[in-house]
Image (cartoon, rainbow, N blue to C red):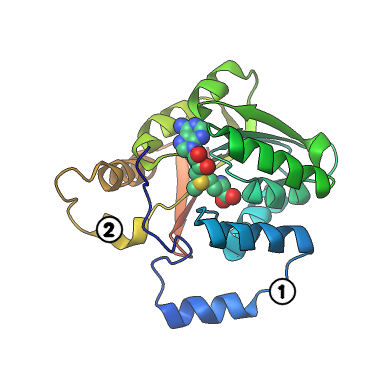
Amino acid sequence: MARQVPRHAHEGVLEPAVDRYLNALLPRRDSILAEMERLAKREDIPIIGPACGRLLALAVQVSGAKRIFEMGSAIGYSALWMARAAGRGAKIHYTDSDPRNVARARAFLRRAGVSSRVEMHQGDALDVLRKTSGMFDLIFIDVNKDQYPAALRLALGRLRRRGLLVADNVLWYGRVAHAAKRGDTSTRAIQEFNQKIYADKNLFPVIVPLRDGVAICRKG
Ligand SMILES: C[S@@+](CC[C@H](N)C(=O)[O-])C[C@H]1O[C@@H](n2cnc3c(N)ncnc32)[C@H](O)[C@@H]1O
């Protein structure tokens, strides 16, 4: 599969000095999150990073979400932020198509002591969501960017009323602000996703321009 994101996935739309400033304010992470961040940096794995991890954790805490579905979980970094924020009795559905990611995530989540809160699924996240029953309090979309419109359609039908839909990379390194180049299907798909969330009378979306842009939408 062709790489979808530019190298240095930690860089986003913010001016680099502002990005550095915000990151310097962040408290130190525990040894597991720190190890995951080092692995992601070394192997260029596009995790949400600590600033957006906190945003995700805040969304979980404020909404009280307990039943959470993540589409695209990689090594389990964002899943760990959500599992900790959701607390005991929560269930986070982890999904990734890459078996190596699943194995690494499983090991990290076990060491972090949250395995019992996380259900691991290997496979296409959209297929897994179709096959998993029930409604969710929060759905986090972080799959291939071309799939965002399809993921949105599917997720909306599986989100409970007052639930939160969260999506990463919705500013896509600023490319969404310009006409997509020929063949740039990722930018086009994210533009479509952003238009759809703001056009939907049943959603209340806000895009937070942190890192690469995070959309947080409350379902009415
Ligand atoms: C941006 S990374 C996820 C990062 C993770 N959410 C985090 O912040 O820690 C995207 C991951 O989704 C996986 N992926 C992409 N499209 C997928 C799909 N349709 N189904 C399952 N996994 C997918 C890729 O293998 C990759 O590991």
Mark 1 surroundings within 10 Å by alpha-carbon count, few (fewer than 14), some (14 through 19), many (20 or more): few
- The residue where tag 2 is placed is 175
Q: Is residue 154 above or below residue 146?
A: above
Q: Please indicate whether residue 15 sits to the left or right of residue 139 in the image.
A: left
Q: Please indicate whether residue 87 sits to the left or right of residue 151 in the image.
A: right
Q: Position of residue 176 (x, y in %)?
A: 28, 55
Q: Which mark is residue 166?
A: none
Q: Is residue 24 above or below residue 45?
A: below
Q: CA distance from mark 2 to mark 1?
A: 30 Å
Identify which amino acid the numbered label 1 is placed on.
Answer: Pro
Identify the residue at horizontal 61%, vertical 80% (top origin).
24
Please state, as top left, top right, bottom left or bottom right, where the N terminus lies in the image.
top left
- The residue where tag 1 is placed is 27
**Which of 96 and 188 lies nearest the eye of the viewer?**
96
Identify which amino acid the numbered label 2 is placed on.
Answer: Arg
Residue 214 visible somewhere in the drawing: yes
